[in-house]
Image (cartoon, helix red, strand yellow):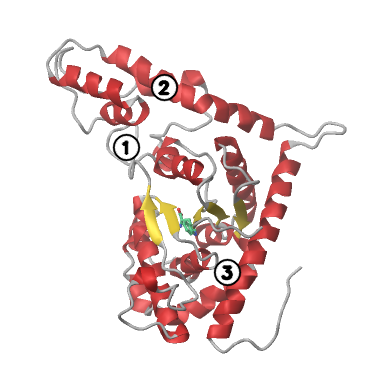
Amino acid sequence: MPTTKPRILTGDTPTHTGLHLGHYVGSLENRLRLQDEYDCYFLIANVHAFTTLAEKPADIRANTLGIVKDWLAVGLDPQRSTFVLQSEIPAIAELTFLFAMLIPFNKVMRNPTLKTEIESKGLGDTYPFGFPMYAVGQCADILTFRPDLVPVGEDQEAHIEMCRDVALKFNQLYCGVGNRVPAEEHHKQGGVFPIPRAKVGRVGRLVGLDGKNKMSKSLGNAIFLYDSEKDVQKKINKIVTGRATATSPLADDNPLAQYIDVFLPRERAEQIKADYASGKEVMDGHIKAEVGAAINTLLAPMRERRARLEEPPQPGKPGGEEMVLGVIREGIKKANAQAEETLALAKKAMGLEFVNRTLH
Ligand code: TRP
């Protein structure tokens, strides 16, 4: 169905399952909100998962299904939005190769997001060629769908910048867009690719329960979206606030302080922070109970939807997995219709339009 809504593309790499609150406030919450106003494409970067997990294809497959379940549980809606399985969209692979000619090799290798990943994942100097290549692939993931906006976490901004560079260069080289034309004018001036912008979520970086690092599964400092009510409260209760007495202030960078801001209504958060700051007697236990309850209210419907997706098949009723596979298949169809259109435009601009092809 043709639509005039502005378009969004964003995605996740299935290197693990188990979304946590950091994912939620950094990105998913944004996606949920944007589903009505935008024509949304949500991509599962399952090819990219092979950059670090090539020996574990079964894990990647399980995580791929897991991500789709997560999305459905959180409330992303495949009726309104398009779920894109990267490995089934040939245009993405083709554009990756073509775009690789438009980015200097050294620029890819200087990409700060890649550098951080090499360090934090301990990849040393043994990572495959495909690892830095994924940054080029991500440009193709995005531009294949010609979105206006790319909602991502802060850590992805370098990739979006590279994607913008590729789109600018493509439009200039192959579509006759002048060097001085500003990014927002490129599409109007005949560029195949609108120049997308990053949109960072409400909370760029949610601190983990340890108070030191970003919330992350591998660091063991996360609250997962499907933790039981009890576990959520237990984890919150374990936060070390480091206050000497019940009238000591609460440090701004303490995780409890950030969670108060993020998960309680604004007015209530202001009041609690004012109480902490003024030397009033404040019991951390009460505040932790309030924050834990707010998080549990947020998570309850997600837990319920997720449980339905885990159900085994019954006679006459498909199980959760069959539903998920159905959603994936539908998404692939919708995504390829769009992707093939972009690829045809790009190839034409490059003088590569030798045949009309159709994918079925
Ligand atoms: N690299 C992103 C991540 O690990 C996932 C991703 C792949 C992505 N392709 C994308 C995000 C395109 C936004 C747009 O989080």
Split into 4 quadrants, where in the image is the C terminus? bottom right
Above-or-below relation of 70 to 123:
above
Q: Quadrant of the N terminus?
A: bottom right
The residue shown at (73%, 74%) is: 358
Q: Amino acid at mark 2?
A: Ala
What residue sits 48% from the left and 22% below the top?
297
The residue that disc 3 covers is 92
Please tell me how crowded label 2 is: few (under 14), some (14-19), or many (20+) other residues with Cα within 10 Å. some
- Measuring from the top left, give residue 284's x and y in whole percent: 27, 15
| Label 3 packing within 10 angstroms: few (<14), some (14-19), many (20+) | many
Q: How many labels were placed on the picture? A: 3
Left or right of 95, for residue 196: left
Q: Earlier in the sequence, mark 3 or mark 2?
A: 3
The mark nearer the N terminus, 3 or 1, is 3
Q: Tell me the element at label 3.
A: helix
241 vs 35, left or right, is: left
Q: Is residue 67 above or below residue 48?
A: above
Q: Which mark is residue 207?
A: 1
Question: x, y percentage for residue 225?
Answer: 50, 32
Residue drawn at x 44%, y 79% as measured from the top left: 171
Residue situated furthest right in the rendering: 315
Q: Which mark is residue 110?
A: none
Spatial CA span between label 3 and label 1: 34 Å
Q: Residue at the location (21% across, 23% down)?
A: 273
The response on whether ligand 1 sits within 8 Å of label 2 is no
Query: What residue sits right under mark 2 in the picture?
Result: 294
Residue 73 in the image: state x and y as whole percent. 59, 36
In front of the other: 112 or 6? 6
